[in-house]
């Protein structure tokens, strides 16, 4: 199995997902937005990335808290939008942000 029984099982995003046509554009226009891309380096190389975003790879079997720690966002109320290729990894990372006390983290899907 990808996750051992002792590892936390990250739930879905606390406030729901943000679909491209349902809020991404408004969030991207917010200068305070922290945009986190959790795709692999190969995915970023193959498909590019959104300018201004932070890239921290997080595969499904990896601990999403590592991304939270690496991003080191000091403002726990800052808007955070996490995305990946499909939505599963970004959902886990967004949930890890929320579990770490960030009040405005969203899963942007893929």
Image: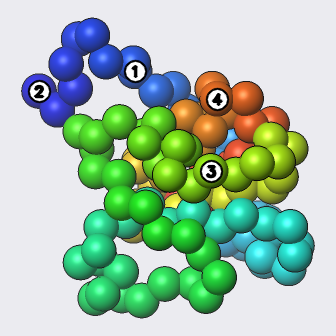
- Neighbor class of circle 3 (other Cα within 10 Å; few <14, some 14-19, many 20+) is few
Q: Decide which of tag 3 and tag 1 comes sooner along the chain.
A: 1
Mark 3 lies on residue: 72
Lateral position of residue 74 relative to residue 8, left or right: right
Q: Decide which of tag 1 and tag 4 comes sooner along the chain.
A: 1
Q: Secondary structure at mark 1?
A: loop
User: How far across and down, in percent of the image, does residue 107 sit?
Assistant: 61, 51
User: How far across and down, in percent of the image, does residue 52 sit?
Assistant: 65, 82
Mark 1 lies on residue: 9
Q: Secondary structure at mark 2?
A: loop
Which label sits in the foreground, 4 or 2?
A: 4
Mark 2 lies on residue: 1
Which label sits in the foreground, 3 or 1?
A: 3
Residue at (28, 88) in percent of width and height: 46
Q: Decide which of tag 2 and tag 3 comes sooner along the chain.
A: 2
Residue at (57, 84) in percent of width and height: 50
The label on residue 21 is none
CA gap, disc 3 to disc 1? 22 Å
CA gap, disc 4 to disc 3? 11 Å
CA gap, disc 2 to disc 3? 29 Å
Mark 4 lies on residue: 100
- Neighbor class of circle 4 (other Cα within 10 Å; few <14, some 14-19, many 20+) is few
Nearer-the-camera pick, 91 or 62: 62
Q: Secondary structure at mark 4?
A: loop
Q: Are marks 1 and 4 in contact (CB under 8 Å)?
A: no
């Amino acid at each position: 199995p990808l996750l051992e029984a002792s590892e936390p099982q990250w739930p879905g995003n606390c406030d729901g997902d943000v679909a491209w046509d349902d809020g991404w554009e408004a969030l991207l226009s917010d200068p305070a937005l922290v945009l986190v891309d959790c795709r692999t380096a190969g995915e970023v190389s193959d498909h590019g990335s959104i300018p201004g975003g932070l890239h921290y790879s997080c595969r499904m079997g990896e601990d999403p808290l590592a991304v939270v720690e690496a991003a080191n966002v000091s403002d726990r109320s800052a808007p955070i939008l996490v995305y990946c290729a499909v939505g599963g990894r970004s959902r886990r990372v967004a949930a890890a942000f929320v579990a770490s006390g960030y009040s405005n983290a969203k899963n942007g899907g893929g």
